[in-house]
Amino acid sequence: VVGFEIVESAVLDARKNAEANNVTAAQFFCGDLSELLRTLDFRKEFGRPDVAIIDPPRPGMHPQCVKDVVRLWPKRIVYVSCNPSTQARDITALHEQGGYRLLSLHPVDMFP
């Protein structure tokens, strides 16, 4: 497991949870995903990801981040979103740039 998060307290919590649950095969990095992916040779260090779980901020993924994720070439992408319009835009970009297909969509109203 390799986790990226821009919020430092979330990274610290992830590390604490991994330790508390005796998870040793997990690393967590703090920072902007696009910047981290450009400074880290992810594929060389960690290999091709089986799954990328992406939970971008409301404005969606930065266009460079889409390119970086496509370059990683994860076997599957799980995209969590609080903004359906930016999710649609990003899914289209992932399809056009990386050939990914939308297999299922599960909307959940978190604020009923």
Image: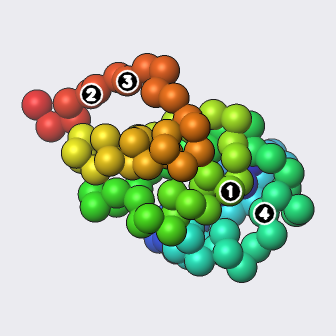
Would you say the residues marked 2 and 1 are in contact, meaning their CB atoms lie under 8 Å apart? no
Residue at numbered disc 2 = 108
Question: Label 1 vs label 3: CA separation?
Answer: 23 Å
Q: Which residue is mark 4?
A: 42
Residue at 46 percent across and 27 percent down: it is: 102
Q: Secondary structure at mark 3?
A: loop
Query: Left or right: 79 with respect to 74?
Result: left
Q: Quadrant of the C terminus?
A: top left
Identity, as a three-letter code, of the amino acid under mark 1: Arg
| Nearest the eye: 100 or 46 | 100
* Mark toward the start of the polypeptide (3 vs 4): 4
Of marks 1 and 3, the one in the foreground: 1
Amino acid on which the number 3 mark rests in the picture: Leu
Of the image marks 2 and 4, the number of the one nearer the N terminus: 4
Asked which secondary structure carries label 4, the reply is helix
The tag on residue 105 is: 3
